Amino acid sequence: MAYLVISFFLAAMKASMPSLSSDPMWDARVSLAALYRLFEHFGWSDIVYTHLSARVPGERDKYFINSYGLLFDEICASNLVMVDFDGRVVNGSGTYNKAGHAVHSAVLKARPDVNYVLHSHTRAGAAVSSMRCGLLPISQPALAVSSTLAYHTYGVAEAGGEEGARVVGDLGQKFAMLLQNHGLLVCGRTAAEAFLYHYFLDMACAVQLDILSATDDYVTPPADEIRKLAEWGAPRAKPWGDAPWNALMRLLDRKDASFRK
């Protein structure tokens, strides 16, 4: 009886964890494909016009990105494109978003601690990015990202390396950024960490829009509480976000596991 209980417990633990292969490169592909599917699930995609990237494990100067023209729910591990920092397609077919390359290659080159870079044009993110007040400390998600939030004035990425350098300079060592009049940019050491920061930032923007559309007489938390939650949400010694990420991977597997192919 004890053996059956232990076996059931171990099986349940295994089922709750994301399946990993023995190939870190393939795992990075699967994680990035999962991010694209999650962006579609949460309504963060913009037809084909935003982009997410993952550094190729063991390759400091190469990254994976989507093949341009695919909807996010069409992206899977095998159809991602591998690109080097010089813009050459190293592996995969099709092309990629050149504006995306200017940003992703610049951030990954400047931040060896970062392995995932996510860019979106969510409606809430674009709206708050265009507010002179920026992100206000009036919700828990806003406080959670406040200690690692940067701002970047508008620029056109197609202009070349200058815009990528400006993005890197404004981002510094932070993990989230409002691209003014544009949208959101977040990064992370893992897919889980990058996703969590994007979730908090977009949720904070959506809540701010709800509040400001209803009243200008909002409540701001006490300064000590703002500080505590800002410290809680700051990047930690080790990447975080595994618990929600594992749950979301189970969600994707139930919905459509083709992202793993």
Image (cartoon, rainbow, N blue to C red):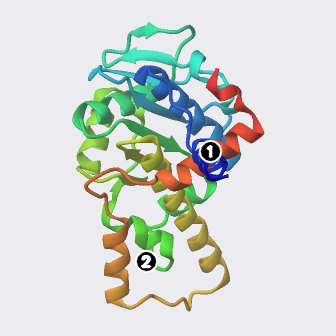
Q: Quadrant of residue 57?
A: top left
* Residue type beneath disc 1: Ser
Using the image, determine if residue 74 lies above or below residue 40: above
Which label sits on residue 170? none
Asked if residue 240 lies left or right of residue 16, the reply is: left
Residue hosting label 2: 137
Residue under pointer 1: 7
> Do callouts 1 and 2 mark residues in contact (Cβ within 8 Å)?
no
Q: Give the residue at the far right of this rendering.
A: 255
Splitting the image into 4 quarters, where does residue 244 fall? bottom right
The reply to whether residue 158 is visible in this rendering is: no
Q: Nearer the viewer, residue 213 or 117?
A: 117
**Residue displayed at 37% across by 86% down:** 225
Place of residue 113 in the rendered image (x, y in percent of width and height, measured from the top left): 26, 40
Residue at screen point 41% across, 8% down: 90
Question: On the rendered structure, is 158 left or right of 95?
Answer: left
- Residue at image position (58%, 16%) is 78
Q: Relative to 27, is 138 above or below? A: below
Amino acid residing under circle 2 = Pro
Q: Secondary structure at mark 1?
A: helix
As rendered, which of 205 and 21 lies closer to the eye? 21
Dot 2 alpha-carbon crowd within 10 angstroms: few under 14, some 14 to 19, many 20 or more: many
